[in-house]
Image (cartoon, rainbow, N blue to C red):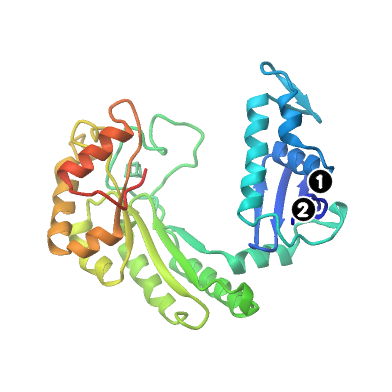
Amino acid sequence: MIDLQTQAMSCISEGKHAYLYSPNIPQTLLIHPLLKIVLDMRAEGVDLRVWVNGLENFGCLDIKGEKTSRKELEYYIEYSFFLEAHGYLKDIKKSCLKDLYIDAEIVKENLRATPQISFEVTERCNLKCEYCGYGELYSGYEDRIGRDLPLESAKSFIAYIMKLKESASSNRLVTSTAVTFYGGEPLLNFEFIKEIVKYIDQFKSIYTQFIFNMTTNAVLLDKHIEYLVENRFFIAISLDGDETQNSFRRFPNGESTYGKIVGNVMMLKEEFPDYYNDYVSFVAVLHSKNSKKKWRISLETSLKKKSYSQT
Ligand code: SF4
């Protein structure tokens, strides 16, 4: 049975931000202020599902200073039960809320337990998709000036994390760490990827195993596929569907990318069928020219991909 009193005590507030620290996972989650209120109310013994049913259906509510709606509250109440069902509310430290704050040890504990390390390998990209998050449609993002992630910084970071894992007690040891490469287009900085894979090799089997992931637009797959297959990279290929559905994804000169991407995917499928089945997935941006259903149909018909797809 979950001790709701101690559960709420592990919600840490820092200004407007609230965190849920769960030593059982262990992870520190940045949580919405409403979720913090919901956890506090559960700790006070309020039956939230009954309570929320008694609230107004429409309009704005003020719950302990937070403006919300009944629908939003219901969402966070169910979210608290979801967290409970997945072990996030177990074995909470019996400390007072006012004594808990994020200190260096909590940060280290989270880094030690991290199941994933992601590297934005480069800002460079060989495409100019119309909806790109760094493109003309958006403002306020950090300027992309073609920087590559410095190799030495990435190596120091890995060494630091591995040192933390080494010092972890055995029951906290994460036995598998996913290393993810994304960009821009990560294959434009292929040397970085190769160096990191080589560097990581020294840590294998001592503290943790590694899984490599990459999100790619697949334009350079023909050049690097053997390496990716050999190192068992899980690759997620960005493709929005058939040629029309994929038409926001363009080369910088405005030409369609569809033929190049599908050509590379078919080559991969023919030369490495098992790898294609087990390690390759697709990701799509949903927009006015496609839909999840159309996208799935196009993958199944033209690329014979029925599983390991995601959106
Ligand atoms: S491939 Fe990705 S990063 Fe490159 S332009 Fe398209 S959306 Fe942007």
Which quarter of the picture shows residue 157?
A: bottom right
Residue 75 to residue 80: above or below: above
Identify the element where label 2 is drawn.
Answer: helix
| Placement of 143 over or under 148, stated as above or below | above
Q: Is residue 57 visible?
A: yes
Side (left or right) of 210 relative to 228: right
Q: Which mark is residue 43?
A: 1
Disc 2 marks a residue whose amino acid type is Gln
How packed mark 1 is, by other alpha carbons closer than 10 Å (few <14, some 14-19, many 20 or more), is: some
Image coordinates of residue 287 in percent, x first then y, are 34, 29
Give the image location of residue 256, x and y in percent.
18, 37
Query: Looking at the image, which is closer to me, 6 or 238?
Result: 6
Quadrant containing the C terminus in the rendered view: top left
Q: Residues within 10 Å of mark 2 (few under 14, many from 20)?
A: many
Q: Are marks 2 and 1 in contact (CB under 8 Å)?
A: yes
- Earlier residue among tags 2 and 1: 2
